[in-house]
Amino acid sequence: MQAPIPTLTQESIALLDKLIATPSVSRDESGTADIIEAFLKAHVKGEVKRIYNNVYVRSPHWSDARPALLMNSHHDTVKPSASYTRNPYEPAHEEGRIYGLGSNDAGASAVSLIAAYRYLEERELPYNMLLAISAEEEVMGEHGMRGLLPELGKIDMALVGEPTGMHAAVGERGLVVMDCTAHGVRGHAARNEGVNAIDVAIRDIERIRNYQFEHTSPLLGNIKMTVTQINAGTQHNVIPDECRFVIDIRTTDAYTNEETAQLVQQLLESDAQPRSTRVHASAIYAEHPLVQAAIAIGRDTFVSPTTSDMALMHGIPSLKMGVGQSARSHGADEFVLESEIEEGIQLYIGFLEKLMA
């Protein structure tokens, strides 16, 4: 029997209280995974499975003839801020607020997605639902979405629950960090000898400042490159033969991260190596059913300044929409409103009913 929304709301808040009370810093979230796994086994029809600390379930009427929707949020948290004035692991209810670490990011989205899945689990929808509450999101660890996604099979689209005020983030910039080394020739500063590696680095930094990529993303705009660190020299009278600097590159869907890194390497005199290329840009356009469903329930669309596990879902059309406000995340005395959870459940259900309808 389908539980009414007020019941789902109260059960979701009770589940959130348990999650807050159980420490779940990234890579050490087995306790909250246990709670979520037990809750799902008690409340859903589908077979609940677990990989590492990622818990997931497929809708019982699964058909390979229908597209698959991944409904994802995470249950890990950052470490509590030193400026907390409350016990971060004590869920406190005051004036409609629920205080506690992970309440806003992203416990409220996780429990609301679970509630929406429960409400619609036995409904015949034009797509399959795959609910996955994942781990290690805050560190993009190998045992979080990176380890889970290859085990899930074909995914056609994804709804990612992160605090957005239940508005629809249709894009996120990706990230490539380049470690660069400019080479020179060591010499004495008092004599006209050597090649100053700092001069080489300066020429490259000027190239970075002035470079315009040929292609621009219609949604995310231009790629942004910023030199954020630089280090050279051992003493005042020695011409340095090496200067190291770091480029922070915020990428778009106009190029893959690998293509972006290669273009930067070709631009510079310095050696430049990407630390990683796995944090991809994400962009989904207005004609996609995910965006259409969000618009149909009155949600605004925007480009998110923060990253999420959408960055790891390369090639999967994804939309980020969740309970709470991003500005509350990672700060002291984190909270979410009880009313936001109730609204989130209702909006998730409405969104899922409109999707591909």
Image (cartoon, helix red, strand yellow):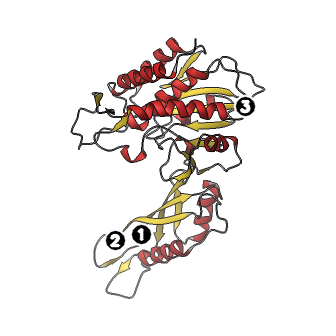
Q: CA distance from mark 3 to mark 2?
A: 57 Å
- Residue 260 image point, x, y percent: 61, 60
Precedes in sequence: disc 3 or disc 2: 3
Q: Which residue is rendered at x = 51% and y = 17% of the image? A: 40
Q: Nearer the viewer, residue 245 or 295?
A: 295
Res. 127 in view: yes
| Classed neighbour count for the residue bearing mark 3: other residues with Cα under 10 Å, few (<14), some (14–19), many (≥20) | some
Instruction: Find out whether the residues at labels 1 and 2 contact each other: C-beta distance under 8 Å.
Output: yes
- Give the quarter of the figure containing the C terminus: top right
The residue identified by callout 1 is 243
At which x and y percent is residue 201?
46, 73
Question: Dot 1, crowdedness within 10 Å: few (<14), some or many (≥20)?
Answer: many
Residue position for label 2? 233
Between discs 3 and 1, the one toward the N terminus:
3
The amino acid marked with disc number 1 is Cys
- Name the quadrant containing residue 19: top left
Give the x, y percent position of residue 80: 30, 38
For the N terminus, the quadrant is top right
User: Label 3 belongs to which residue?
Assistant: 67
Callout 3, which amino acid?
Answer: Pro
Labels 3 & 2 near each other (Cβ < 8 A): no
Residue 83 point in image, percent of width and height: 23, 44
Q: Find the distance from the CA under tag 3 to the CA under tag 1.
A: 51 Å
| Along the line of sight, the residue nearer the viewer: 268 or 193 | 268
